[in-house]
Amino acid sequence: MAAAASCGPTRGRRITHRAEDPEATHAQPARGPPACDPYTATGGVVAGVKRRRAAPRTTTPSAGSSVKSLCPHGRRHDRCKECGGANICEHGRQRYSCKECGGAGICAHGRQRSRCKECGGVGTCGHGRVRSHCKECGGSTICEHGRERRRCRECGGSTICEHGRERRRCRECGGVGICEHGRVRSSCKECGGSAFCVHGRRRACCKECGGASICEHGRVRRCCKECGGSAICEHGRARHRCRGGGGTGLCVHGRRRYRCKEGGGGRGSGGGAPPRPRAGRRRGPPPQ
């Protein structure tokens, strides 16, 4: 016990070794630097000696643990298409979000459950929009300019290329949204773009398909006066043809831009559409 105590601080104290048995003094070994072990043989701790702390335990993920390891492509193994993850279905999508597989994330209306208005999805706000994309709610994806952050040029959005266009629709960057015909893939009829219905019209403007742009009166919603369409001005005319509203379809002379010769209109200047034949006016050579 005396040997263990000698390794501690001895400032201001005088340590004396007393031996009750006179023969014990001769039996002691030669003095030397004592072993500084804060713990004695009996397991007690010596006062004034800093306690030795054990090294932190390191846990390795076992076979049944919830720790997900990453594959060589930097993704989770179960979500990587190239590695054939267990969560990837036969259609190449996340099984949870696949409509054809009946994923749990798809509601009865065929939409993503968290973004479905009718199901009251948690991702939908009180204005009927996706919460993160709602300006009034201050959505997290809306920048200070009132646009979606990833599509804002001033904020340097991630989808904006060096040419100032949306990267997937930029021809010079070889965007994935550009088809082999040089058009936007979704708007190309030859490629079977998703914007066209089975009738060969724009899906949103097709009455038979019940397009989203068709109002209850059977017109294009933005051009419907009764619905207050955005293309109708306060005077009840088409906005681009209204003189009072400074319509873009009118030239500086107050005429239709494409009909004005002085303004470089298409008709009469060799460009644009030819003039319509008037009723009762015969065109072509006279009959023989």
Image (cartoon, rainbow, N blue to C red):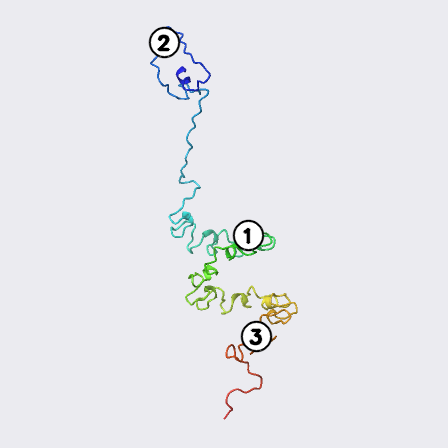
Sooner in the amino-acid sequence: mark 3 or mark 1: 1
Name the residue at 34% across, 10% down.
Answer: 27
In the rendered image, which residue does mark 2 sit on?
Answer: 25
Q: Quadrant of residue 23?
A: top left
Q: How far apart are labels 2 and 1 at the CA level?
A: 84 Å
Judged from the image, the secondary structure of the residue bearing numbered disc 2 is: helix
In the rendered image, residue 1, in percent from the top left (x then y), is placed at 41, 15
Pick the front one: 251 or 185? 251
Task: Tell me which amino acid carries mark 3.
Answer: Arg
Please state which amino acid type lies under the numbered disc 1. Answer: Ser
Q: Is 249 situated above or below 24?
A: below
Q: Residues within 10 Å of mark 3 (few under 14, many from 20)?
A: many
Label 3, label 2: how far apart the Cα atoms are:
121 Å
Judged from the image, the secondary structure of the residue bearing numbered disc 3 is helix
Amino acid type, label 2: Thr
Q: Indicate the position of residue 126 as horizontal and vertical percent values.
A: 61, 53
Upstream in sequence: badge 3 or badge 2: 2
Disc number placed over residue 257 in the picture, else none: 3
The residue carrying mark 1 is 132
